[in-house]
Amino acid sequence: MRGQILAQLLAAIRCFTMNTFCLTRCCLLLGCALFSGCATAPAEPGSGSVESWSWQVPSSSWLDLAKQAEARLQWQEAGIWLDRYARLPEAQLDEEFWFHRAAVAEQAGDLYRSAEVREQLLAKHPEDVWLRIDLADDYQQLGRGGEAVQLLQVAVAYDDDRQHLGLALVTLLEQQERWYDAAEQAERLAMESRESVARQWWERASAFYEKGGDLTRATICMERALKGWDLGAEEKRVLERLRAFELGEPENVADALLLLRNHPDPEMRLKGIRYLARDRFPNDVGVMEFALRDQDPRILVIALEQIAQRSERGRQAAVLPLLQHDDERVVLRALRALRQVGTETALGAVITAMDPDNRAQFRAARDAAEAISGHAIGLGLDPSLEERRQIKKAWVDWFAVQGEDKLGG
């Protein structure tokens, strides 16, 4: 009995063991199957990286998936599906496809890809203005501004196309802060446009020139923009004053004074003083004395000539410092002015400027000294170098004997 019971128990244990082994084995097999299935089954589109599962999707679905990605505004994913499709031998790659591919790349911010596609398209269609403009925009954003400008600087046959390219080029140059180039392009467009549009281009050209520091050209363009407009009297006067200041074309003393006192360009200041030198006007001597502060020797020469003609004796303070000027022309005119306006207090400086080695300066200083003092030394009009040295010494000795008190110093 005991043996049967033990046998039954052993049989039961064996059976349990076998069943347990089978169950464990089934679980293991099921687990492996599930694991294997997880490793090979494709993920749902849009989950995880598209690159990691896109190749496992049938190629017949790639175009549809690209459309679905575009609908979700997933432009980068759409580009991946389109590029996958483009590699298929049976792919229908017409120009519409490639124009669309460039647009998708642009939406995705993939400017390298959009530029690459558009370069290939432009090689086939160099006459396509809008394609050229789009590619130039890609170049600009990629930091290839020079190439972008070159791309738009093409001759085209139709007026509308020139206007579109011109507008794009102006915008591009403005973004690059190439003010002068932008202004010149705007001028060209103004000359090619009808009056109402041309006026806007002239205004833009004026603004660009002003930003570039060329106020003269800015003024000319503004005049052209306002041509034909019914301006009021005050507006006309402002424009005239602006023209006088920027173009150096004064129409009255006020315009000329504005040029002389304020213009940064010495050529314009020169035009101002030349206008003022034509006739007398209130406080003209004071204006000429103000001009003696200028750095341009040409302006100093004119101012000194006018002081010699207009001023009175004793008004010499503004003239005396110019005897030390580096430009010989200025020193000569200063001595000639002192001949007319100088007093005995200027004699010391005049005699010092009497340079025997410089014939013209010696003569001018000698004439001034004689006119101021009423004293003459030597009779020759054109003495030799040695005679000039002797005359200079005689003037120095005479001046020392006279003394400052006697000469009014």
Image (tube, grey):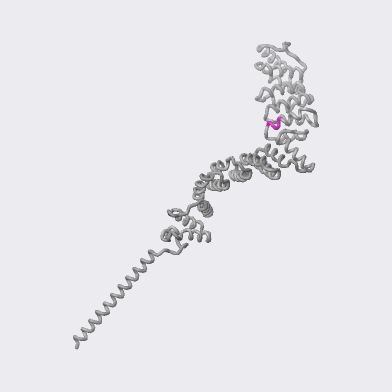
Residue shown at 27% from the left, 79% from the top: 16
Task: Decide which of 309, 357 is in the foreground and name it.
Answer: 309
**Does 398 sit left or right of 2 as displayed?**
right
User: Is 106 rendered above or below residue 378?
Assistant: below
Task: Decide which of 87, 286 is in the foreground and name it.
Answer: 87
**Does 294 sit left or right of 64 as displayed?**
right
Extreme residue toward the bottom, this view: 1
Note whether residue 109 is visible: no
User: What is the magenta segment's predominant secondary structure?
Assistant: helix
**Does 140 sit left or right of 52 as displayed?**
right
Image location of residue 349, percent across then percent down: 70, 22
Residue shown at 69% from the left, 43% from the top: 194
User: Is 16 rendered above or below residue 304?
Assistant: below
Quarter of the rendering occupied by the N terminus: bottom left
Image location of residue 263, percent across then percent down: 70, 35
Choose top left, top right, bottom left or bottom right for residue 163: top right
Residue shown at 77% from the left, 35% from the top: 254
Choose top left, top right, bottom left or bottom right for residue 299: top right
Task: Decide which of 68, 386 is in the foreground and name it.
Answer: 68
Please say whether residue 244 is one of the residues in the magenta stretch. no
Task: Decide which of 170, 156 is in the foreground and name it.
Answer: 156
| Numbered circles on residues, count | 0
User: Is 283 rendered above or below residue 201?
Assistant: above
**Does 212 sit left or right of 111 as displayed?**
right
Image location of residue 50, percent across then percent down: 45, 59
Image location of residue 138, percent across then percent down: 54, 48
Residue bounds of the magenta highlight: 266-270
Note whether residue 238 is visible: yes
Quarter of the rendering occupied by the C terminus: top right
